[in-house]
Image (cartoon, rainbow, N blue to C red):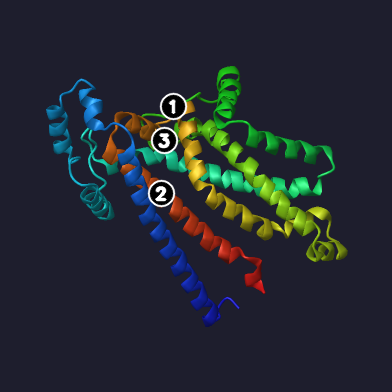
Amino acid sequence: MSGDPRRLTVDFMVVLRRLFVALCGIALSSVVVFISLRVLPGDIATTRLGIDATPEALAALRDEYGLDQSYFSQYVDWIGNAVRGDLGTSMVTGDDVGSEIISRLDVTMPLIIASSVLSVTLAVWLGRRTTLRRGQTSGVIADALSQIGGAVPTFVVGVFLITVFAVQLRLLPAGGFPTEGWRVPLDALRSLLLPLLCLAASQSSVLVRFARSHSLDYLASDAFRTARSVGRNSDAAMATARRLVLTPVLGVTALQIATLLTGAVVVESVFALPGIGSMLIRDIANRDLPKVQSTLLLVVVLVFLVRFVVDVIVDRLDPRRLS
């Protein structure tokens, strides 16, 4: 029973253990991010002053930015301020890093969340439908499209969508985002529709395979044969597998979050969206160290947070909990 105190205690301990693992992962990832950025060639001093700058000028600028301190001191200062909510100041613009990141999340987060919801919904539906029609034309076509979606690069899908829906049909904008942002919701939605479809196409093509695999397992199970024996048709009998199929799809989605963020970088570049990805590429080129490391830290936190939430949801959806 769901109200059993012993089960509630076990559930609480599982959540605490997952939370502890997530926090340890974030801490370790922050160290990796910090060290990785330090071993890259060049820094903000050489970028701003050029290769002909004198050693004295380079040393003075590094001292101004605190780059002459030990790595340990730099890491402690950075992570300590980040824990308090201070992500630092941009070395290039002098603006608050946290404010700049938040302004970009208005584009990136709706894009990632909407594409994830759409891809999971499509994967579960297509996985069950292609299983029931695996020998029919519709099933073969759907299966082929999922294979193609996984093979074609994301930027190619983006160019195709722009060519068809923006250039030829002129139904949607080819790129950009309204300067008023979400204060003009219709224009904002129209500008994100093609990027959303582009990102969801590549993600759902992977998820469909997992959904189809588990649907095939259910098709060969006693539960499906029992449902058919009591008079249900194939669609109605397969509908009961929704929970069984959704669980592994959500699990794979949690593992794909980092890849999804990488795909968002490509999509934002193709559609000229002012999101986290496009900002990160520019800041890396400028060697804006505080901004790059704080942006990557935020991405790491989001990845572990989403995986934590999805793991908790998957635990609740586990069919064995119903026994």
Give the CA distance from mark 2 to mark 1: 24 Å
Q: Secondary structure at mark 1?
A: loop
Residue type highlighted by circle 2: Val
Q: Is residue 211 left or right of residue 49?
A: right
Give the CA distance from mark 2 to mark 3: 14 Å
Q: Disc 1 or 3, which lies upstream in sequence? A: 1
Front-lying residue, 244 or 175: 244
> Which quadrant of the view contains residue 26?
bottom left
Q: Tell me the residue that label 1 is attached to.
A: 272
* Crowd band around label 1 with a 10 angstrom C-alpha radius: few (<14), some (14–19), many (20+): some
Q: Secondary structure at mark 3?
A: helix
* Crowd band around label 2 with a 10 angstrom C-alpha radius: few (<14), some (14–19), many (20+): many
Front-lying residue, 192 or 7: 7
- Callout count: 3
If the image is split into quadrants, where does the C terminus sit? bottom right
Question: Can I make out residue 100 in this image?
Answer: no
From what the image shows, is residue 20 above or below residue 107? Answer: below
Q: Tell me the residue that label 3 is attached to.
A: 277
Q: Is residue 11 left or right of residue 72?
A: right
If the image is split into quadrants, where does the N terminus sit? bottom right
Q: Is residue 211 left or right of residue 185?
A: right
Residue 6: where, in percent of width, then height? 53, 81
Mark 2 or mark 3, whichever is nearer to me: 2
Mark 1 or mark 3, whichever is nearer to me: 3
Pointer 1 with pointer 3, Cβ within 8 A: no
Q: Residue furthest bottom?
A: 5
Residue type highlighted by circle 1: Ala
Tell me the residue at 51%/72% (across/down).
11
